[in-house]
Amino acid sequence: MTWAVVRIRGQVHLSQKVHDTLWMLHLTRANHCVFLPQNDAMKGMVQKVKDHVTWGEVSPEMVAKLLLKRGRAAGSGRINDDYVKANSKFKSVWDFAQALTKGDAKMTDVKGLKSVLRLHPPKGGYRAIKRSFRDFGDLGYRGDAVNRLLDRMIFEEAN
């Protein structure tokens, strides 16, 4: 399984350990999102920065939607099925999204694909960025509810 980890809080008043861990996770700014495998090393890192991020299990549909809307290649170009097919062993974005959520693939498996997704603040705003999800806030583990948050953070362009 794969987690989607989203940084919610900014850079003010961070301890050096938390700052370094966020840097290693490539979460350098608020509203950045990365996909991480569920293993002991990542669990420990995410637990260390739990007061600055939210995370949960992401669905293949949401991964595909995020990659098509907010995924960028080198040079800030958009990605599509042709790009994924030309730069990886996967036939489409959907195949890559399924492999990514199962834990069979990483973002680096597609050459030139940036590992960080830059998202917008959620439509409707955050509830509370200083409280945990269990206490009606936004921080910490949120399980499948991360899909709803990510859907609110994808900017739908007007035609």
Image (cartoon, rainbow, N blue to C red):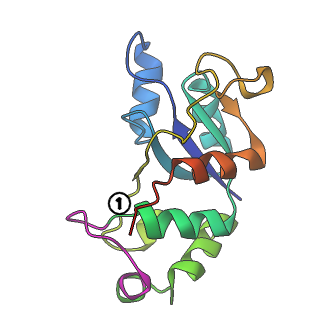
Nearer to me, 90 or 70: 70
Residue 21 location (% of width, % of height): 46, 30
Farthest residue to the front: give it: 159
Residue 143 location (% of width, % of height): 76, 44
Using the rendered view, name the quadrant where residue 79 is placed.
Answer: bottom left
- On the question of residue 103 being in view, the answer is no
Is 122 left, or right, of 2 in this rendering? Answer: left
- On the question of residue 53 being in view, the answer is yes
Image quadrant occupied by the C terminus: bottom left
Image quadrant occupied by the N terminus: bottom right
- Which stretch is magenta? 73-84
Is 147 left, or right, of 112 in this rendering? Answer: right
Residue 13 location (% of width, % of height): 41, 9
Farthest residue to the top: give it: 13
Q: Which residue is mark 1?
A: 114
Q: How many marks?
A: 1
Q: Is residue 67 above or below residue 44?
A: below
Q: Is residue 58 above or below residue 130?
A: below
Q: Secondary structure at mark 1?
A: loop
Farthest residue to the right: give it: 134
Nearer to me, 155 or 53: 155
Q: Is residue 126 part of the magenta span, yes or no?
A: no
What residue do we see at 67% from left, 17% from top? 131
Is 6 left, or right, of 81 in this rendering? Answer: right
Using the rendered view, name the quadrant where residue 95 is placed.
Answer: bottom right
Mark 1: which amino acid?
Lys
What residue do we see at 68% from left, 42% from top? 40
- Considering the whole magenta stretch, tell me its main secondary structure: loop
Residue 59 location (% of width, % of height): 69, 62
Q: Residues within 10 Å of mark 1 (few under 14, many from 20)?
A: some
